[in-house]
Image (cartoon, grey):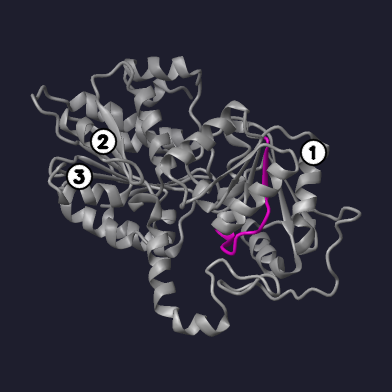
Amino acid sequence: MSFKSLGLSEPILKAIQEKGYETPSPIQAKAIPPVLEGKDVLASAQTGTGKTAGFTLPMLHNLSSSRTEQRHRPIRALVLTPTRELAAQVHANVKEYSTHLNIRSTVIFGGVNQKPQVNKLSQGVDVLIATPGRLLDLESQGLLSLKRVEIFVLDEADRMLDMGFVRDIERVMKLIPAKRQNLMFSATFSKDIKKLAYTILNKPVQVEATPENTAVEVIEQKVYRVAKGKKTGLIIKLISDGDWKQVLVFTRTKHGANNLCKKMISAGITAAAIHGNKSQGARTKALAGFKNGSIRVLVATDIAARGLDIPLLPHVVNYELPNIAEDYVHRIGRTGRAGAEGQAMSLVSADETSYLKGIEKLIGESIPVEILEGFEPDPNASTEPIKPGQNRNRGQRNNRGGNAKNTQKNKPNNRNRNKSRKRSDSRS
C-alpha cells in the first residue's frame, strides 16, 4: 500500500515524499480512508506509530479540497492536546505536511506571553492546535472564535482525562458547531475514554493498529532490582559504563527530577530537567539541547511521556516506576519509534513491587530482571508502595512539605494545589 493509493492529494503526497516517507504505517492505513470520507473516527495506536499523521494528512486534504477564498480565514479545524510539547509537535507536523497547500496554521498554549499568539490568530488561521486552558482563556477574551470549526480532533484523549481536562473539553464542545467531523486519537482507551468518546463522536469508525496497552515490540525491556538509596549510583554507572549519549529518564515528581538532575551534573554528566514547574522557555531550551546532543540526559516527569518527538532515541530509564501502569507504556514509547530499536530500563526498589506487577499484567509479559553487584536490593525493605505525600526517607520532608502535624491542617490547600497542578501544562 502507498500513500497515493489512500487517495491523498498531490500537494500532500509531495510533502510526504520530501519527508522521506514511502509507505503508511498500520494506523495511517486504517485511519486515513474513513477520515477522508468525512466519518468520525475513534483510533487507538501505540505511541510512536505515526498516529499524528493519521489525522493531520486527511484533515489537510479535506480542508484544502473544500476551502473557499475568504478575506478573513476562520478557524476550520481545532486540534486539542493535553501538553505544550505535544501541541508544538502536532503544529510542526501540520506545517510540514501543508507546505504545498494554501493552509495557515498556528499553535497556542499557556506558559508564554499570549501577544504573539494573538497576533497570529488575528491574521486568520485554518488550523488551530491548542491546549485547553489557553484556548478557553483567549476565547473568553473574545480573541478567537470557534463557531466555524468543521473538524475537531482530540489527541491523547486518555492523557486529557488523567490531567483533569474533562470539564474543559465539555466547555470547548459547547463553543463549536454541533455539525462537524470528530476524530479521537490516543495511545490507549479505557472505559472512561470510550464513554467520553461516545458523547463526542457520531457513529464512529473504530480503528486499532496494535493491541491496547502493549509495549512496542522493538523495545528491549529490562528491570534492575536495586535498593532505593542506591538508585542514583546505579543510573550514573549505567550511563557512564555504557557510554550512553542520549538518555531520557523519568521520575515521579518534579522535586525528584530536579534533585536527580543536580546529582547527574555533579557526576560530570550533562543533564537538564523538564516538568510542569519549568517555564516554557526553559523546557524548550532543555529539549533543544537534548536533541542536538549538548545535553546528554533529560530528566522528566510524565509530562514528557507524550509529545516528545525525539528521532532514534536509544535509551529510556524509569528511575521510578509510574503508579499508573499505562504511563509505563507511554514512557517507554519515547524509544523504539518508527521501527527503530530502543532500550527501556527500570530501576525498581522494594516499594515499587506492586507497580511492576501491575505493569507486567497490563503488557502481558514478564520483564527480565537483573541485579548488579554493589547495587543489590535491600532484603529487609518493605514492599508496601509509597503513598502520595508520604515521606520516602525517614527524617526527609516529602515533596509537598510540612510535617505530620501540619498535614491534616493543610489538607484543603493540598487538594486545591493538586487540582491546579493537573492543569499546569495549559494554564501556567
Magenta region: which residues? 314-326
Q: Would you say 43 lies left or right of 134 here?
A: right
How far apart are the two marked residues, 1 and 2, measured between alpha carbons? 42 Å
Which residue is denoted by mark 3 in the rendering?
Answer: 180
What residue is disc 1 on? Answer: 240
Residue beneath label 2, please? 117
Mark 2, mark 3: which one is toward the viewer?
2
What's under tag 1, amino acid-wise?
A: Ser
Q: Identify which residue is drawn at 47% across, 48% down.
A: 278
Q: Amino acid at mark 3?
A: Arg
Residue sitting at the far left: 71
How far, Cα to Cα, is label 1 from label 3?
Answer: 53 Å
Crowd band around label 3 with a 10 angstrom C-alpha radius: few (<14), some (14–19), many (20+): some
Asked if the residue at tag 3 contacts the one at tag 2, i.e. Cβ–Cβ closer than 8 Å, the answer is no
- Looking at the rendered structure, the secondary structure element under dot 1 is helix
* Side (left or right) of 26 relative to 420: right
Label tally: 3
Q: Earlier in the sequence, mark 2 or mark 3?
A: 2
Query: Is residue 164 something one can see in this rendering?
Result: yes
Q: Residue at x 46, y 52 (%)?
A: 277
Amino acid type at circle 2 is Gln
Above-or-below relation of 160 to 393: above
Residue 95, how many percent across, how many down?
35, 25
